[in-house]
Image (cartoon, rainbow, N blue to C red):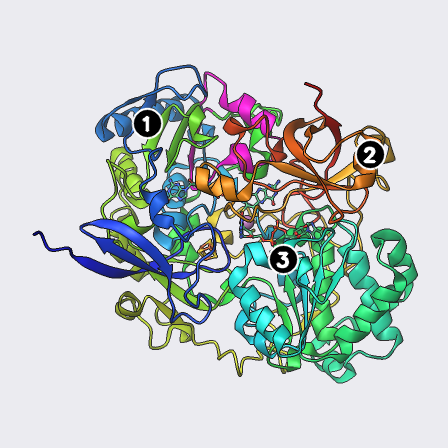
Amino acid sequence: MASVLKTTHHGGCPHDCPDTCSMVYEVENGKLISVRGNPEHPMTRGGLCVKLKDYEKRHYHPERVLHPMRRVGPKGSGQFEQISWEDALTEITDRWKAIIDEYGPQAIIPYSYLGNQGLVHGLNGGDAFFNKMGATVCERTFCGEGSCTAWLLTVGPTAGVDPESFIHSKYIIIWGCNSVSTNLHHWHIVKEAQKRGAKVVVIDPYKSKTAKEADWHISPRPGTDGALAMAMMHTIIEEGLQDQEYVDSYTIGFTELAERAKQRTPEWAEEITGVSAHDIRQLAMEFATTQPAAIRLGVALERNYGGGQAIRAISCLPALVGAWRHVGGGALQFPVWEHPYKFDVICRPDLIPEGTRVINAIQIGRALTNEMDLDIPIKSMMCWNANPVTQAAETDKIVAGLMRDDLFLVSAEHFLSDTASFADIVLPASMGAELEDMVLSWGHLYLTYNAKCVDSPGEALPNNEIFRRLAAKMGYEEENFKWTDSECLENYVDWDSPACEGIDLAFLREHGYARLNVGTKDNRAPHKAGNFPTASGKCHFRIDDATNFVAGPFRQMYDGFQPGEPLDSLPDYVASRETPQTNPELAKRFPLNIISPKSHGFLNSCYANMDNKLKAQGDQFVMISAADADLRQIQHGDNVRVFNDRGGFDAKAQITEDVGQGIVVATLGYWRQRNNGTVNCVSSAEFVDMGHAPTFTDNLVQVERIVQ
Ligand SMILES: Nc1nc2c(c(=O)[nH]1)N[C@H]1C(S)=C(S)[C@@H](COP(=O)(O)OP(=O)(O)OC[C@H]3O[C@@H](n4cnc5c(=O)[nH]c(N)nc54)[C@H](O)[C@@H]3O)O[C@H]1N2
Ligand SMILES: Nc1nc2c(c(=O)[nH]1)N[C@H]1C(S)=C(S)[C@@H](COP(=O)(O)OP(=O)(O)OC[C@H]3O[C@@H](n4cnc5c(=O)[nH]c(N)nc54)[C@H](O)[C@@H]3O)O[C@H]1N2
Ligand code: SF4
Ligand SMILES: [Mo]
């Protein structure tokens, strides 16, 4: 009898999720047979989420793209023929060379995001390649860049409170984050703190899974958090609850902030937010007096026109009450700021020719349809680690652009996603256990290693190998295009930094993960005595002469760093663009504010093509209040159309008390090829006030029963 060889290997979940779980791959006879959470990792604690617990099934899914393919049917028809790697790469580079000859390299645009968060196969791969080419720079501001701009202006690039230190918090505000679905491994810590007596407050316009488990759910209208935070400041200062010594020593601009806050009364905020002045006062007083108090800022906070200003206001709150003095006090945004990655080496922004134009990924539909009036049209796009047809705004324009006969689309993918199905050439990409990498985390303070432990099925190749081969064919000579994956890892991390003391690649290969040397969960209080990584070393309530800019922890990915319009020197409430209050004309036809948060069972659009995940998650639904349903003669379970002037999608009506009147909620990720439209058909590609972040929570729609 042949002996069965079972081995285990260190994994790191590559998905765009703050938790970056440390995993255990189990391999038998060269096949991945199971994937578990690493029981030793202090955040993963042996558990994975519902999406990943059978990750091996995704590796061996029958619909995986296994070979390079060329389109043979009309665009988007999904008809392809298998071709060799050599033919695929030659065809791609021949087409690109011809486009460059005729239009110049800026007629080509890369399009990627964090579909893979590996340093080698996620962040690297394409950026250095397209920078060398001189292609149009794709500015990628989908997720957190408005938040980052606000955070940097206020407290600088600090990881803030260690997510694990929340165990010591006595008052926790989860603000615009559905942790139960999107940050599960932080939620476990919050629940433990709750058991130890902490009060957990969730601020969310609807009763999310997380809001349901809170001690107190506060439900402001979408996009009104700035008003809530300003009124909290009002109460704190009015009651004299600020930590004056902390404020005097470690902040700038208290006098001006206090003056503005004076006008932002809880009664004023009640009108805007719909939260009672009484509740606002109570929240402010509890937050100020129950220390350590910690705020978890969700990405979703930025997704309306005043998102940046709201996040600035919220980021001021911990300094105002001196919460930073304590372990487990302060605010948590993206801990990735203290990870020692060398983004300049990874993405090589230095290779971008001076004067290269920048197009934002959120507005790709406008670029592809040339609504932007580009002097050089986009003639080719390469897409990897991203799926704009489901995830980016104004989808109908994206689809119209991708249908253009003169657009040459190359897609490296695991599956024939909504985007890849429009490609001229599809390249099969390797998955998790098939490649070596380190996975960045924007949600904890560990380095995470991922071993290659099985071969890729068919002819799939890791992203970085695809770009190595493309670079060779294009004749790019820089040494980084020749580094092995292992050499990349040696070069991409600042192993000599204090954060990496005692850690090297060999250690990571052996242990799978390593805690950065940035204090422990039990002693870390980075801003106990100020020490904010801002130019002044202080927390900035006030900023003089600031202008808008695009920032992100991965900002070197695009170098779209052009200073923009002047910013208010103080935080404030800035109204959304599309609400019945701010745009009554539009609201006559489209009276409902839509929120499109993440689906519990999908990871962005990943897993929404797997039947078992779809079954657990359920079909596309839209949550609507009984009052709004009645007005439209909609019954629970009816098929409805959700739409506005930008487009629409079909959904099953879910009548529920979890949403208030005037708000509808439809979660994200369902595939267009399986549905009549997606939530992004209705979302606008306008930016918010800071960092070119998207306005996914700033859209008015109408809902109608579909009459069969
Ligand atoms: N299961 C699952 N997990 C994921 C993902 C996924 O697709 N599925 N995606 C990952 C990614 S890429 C990201 S960026 C994170 C995002 O993680 P989160 O920030 O948690 O993202 P969302 O689920 O979009 O929104 C969270 C909550 O914010 C609320 N919200 C929306 N607008 C506002 C507002 O104006 N004010 C307030 N106070 N709340 C608002 C929504 O109602 C929602 O309940 O999740 C990651 N984790
Ligand atoms: N309405 C609305 N829209 C949103 C949001 C929202 O809350 N509401 N959230 C926004 C946010 S926060 C984000 S982060 C974006 C995410 O937007 P995207 O990053 O575009 O979304 P994903 O669905 O994760 O797409 C990743 C794709 O990469 C592929 N992929 C994964 N790993 C690899 C690999 O190793 N190699 C290759 N070649 N391909 C790979 C996957 O199969 C998948 O198709 O969406 C944004 N869009
Ligand atoms: S998607 Fe997030 S929670 Fe799930 S296994 Fe990956 S890192 Fe962990
Ligand atoms: Mo995201």
Q: Which mark is residue 630?
A: 2
> Does the stretch in magenta take in 406?
yes
| 3D distance between C-alphas at marks 1 and 2 | 54 Å
Above or below: residue 154 compared with residue 584 = below
Of labels 1 and 2, the one closer to you: 2
Expressed as whole percent of the image width and height from the top left, the position of residue 100 reads 39, 26
Residue 477 seen anywhere in this rendered image of the structure: yes
Do residues under tags 1 and 2 come within 8 Å of each other at their CB atoms? no
Q: Earlier in the sequence, mark 1 or mark 2?
A: 1
Q: Which residue is mark 3?
A: 298
Of labels 3 and 2, the one closer to you: 2
Where residue 39 sits, quadrant-wise, is: bottom left
- In the shown orientation, is residue 10 left or right of residue 123? left
- Residue under the point 50% across and 24% down: 402
Q: Describe the element under mark 3 as helix, strand or loop.
A: loop
Q: Is mark 3 within 8 Å of ligand 1?
A: yes
Label 1 crowd (10 A; few <14 / some 14-19 / many >=20): some
Expressed as whole percent of the image width and height from the top left, the position of residue 157 reads 56, 65
- In the shown orientation, is residue 187 left or right of residue 351? right
Span highlighted in magenta in the image: 379-407
Q: Describe the element under mark 1 as helix, strand or loop.
A: helix
Viewer-proximal residue, 252 or 655? 655
- Residue under the point 76% across and 56% down: 225
Residue type indicated by callout 1: Ile
Residue 160 seen anywhere in this rendered image of the structure: no
Above or below: residue 72 compared with residue 645 = above
- Residue under the point 63% across and 30% down: 681
